[in-house]
Image (cartoon, helix red, strand yellow):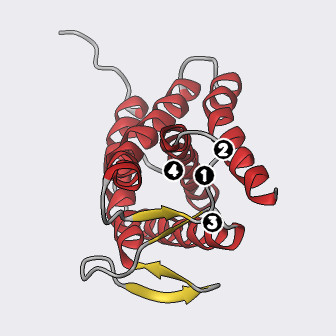
Amino acid sequence: MPDTALYIADLVVGFSLPLVVHLRHRGAGQDRIVRQLFWLGVAIGLTWEVPIFLSAILAASPVVVFLHPPPLHPLWFMVSHSFWDGGLFLAGVLILRAAFGAAALQRFRWAELGVFVLWGQASELLVEITSVSGGLWAYVGTCSWNPALFEWRGHPITLLPQLIWLAAPVAYYLLAVRLVGRSARPARSPG
């Protein structure tokens, strides 16, 4: 069944991300910062993945519904999607480094924040459209606090995830600037 294959691919990619980040960035210095940036993204992702997936499992009116039954318990997907979030944030960091060079994230810049927020919006929209197109899951757009923005293949593309990916890149960016900026400053000598 193609839906099961897509669910499995979702899990394989998600659970591979921590391993890939660890193997590519095993050293100290910048490698350590990349690992920290990944786990920062995972932690921020958990702030919405936990309530969204718990609503899918426990709520009478869930925020998200599975379009076809997943092959494993939804909590596996909650963890996998948190790893995906860490990877999406890291991809945003790579975009910043491509656009702004080695100085990216070393101090607050409105242009960097703007690029990061645009990346968050684009990546969220791509994820949601891909999920609906693949028959995996869709947000429920029938409540006033999560209205449908438009429909894609008969399912709503809703406001809530866009709002999440408007706020989350701002929080991530501010924390990443603090983390990267602190590591880029030379250590103070005593006395």
Local crowd size for mark 2, using a 10 Å CA cut-off: few (<14), some (14–19), many (≥20): few
C-alpha gap between disc 3 and disc 1: 19 Å
Relative to 186, is 95 above or below?
Answer: below
Give the residue at mark 4: 89
Judge left or right: residue 150 versus residue 110: right
Tell me which label, 3 or 4, sits earlier in the chain: 4
Q: Quadrant of the C terminus?
A: top left
- Which residue is at the front of the view, 173 or 16? 16
Q: Residue at x 56, y 69 (%)?
A: 128
Where residue 14 sits: x, y (%)? 63, 41
In this rendering, is residue 21 above or below 45? above
Marks 4 and 1 in Cβ contact (< 8 Å): yes
Q: Are marks 4 and 2 in contact (CB under 8 Å)?
A: no
The Cα atoms of the two marked residues, 2 and 1, are separated by 28 Å
Q: How many residues crowd mark 3 within 10 Å: few (<14), some (14–19), many (20+)?
A: some
Residue farthest to the left? 191
Task: Kindly report which numbered mark, 3 or 4, lies closer to the viewer in this rendering.
Answer: 3
Q: Residue 153 or 73: which is nearer the viewer?
A: 73
In terms of sequence position, does the residue under pointer 4 or pointer 2 come before the other? 2
- How far is mark 3 from mark 4, CA to CA? 19 Å
Is label 4 in a helix, a strand or a loop? helix
Indicate the position of residue 23 as horizontal and vertical percent values: 70, 23
Q: Which residue is mark 2?
A: 71
Amino acid type for the residue under numbered disc 4? Phe
Q: Which residue is disc 1 drawn over?
A: 91
The disc placed on residue 54 is: none
Q: Answer with mark 3 or mark 1, whichever residue precedes in sequence.
A: 1
Residue 131, label in figure: 3
Say whether residue 122 is left or right of residue 112. right
**The N terminus appears in which quarter of the rendering?**
bottom right
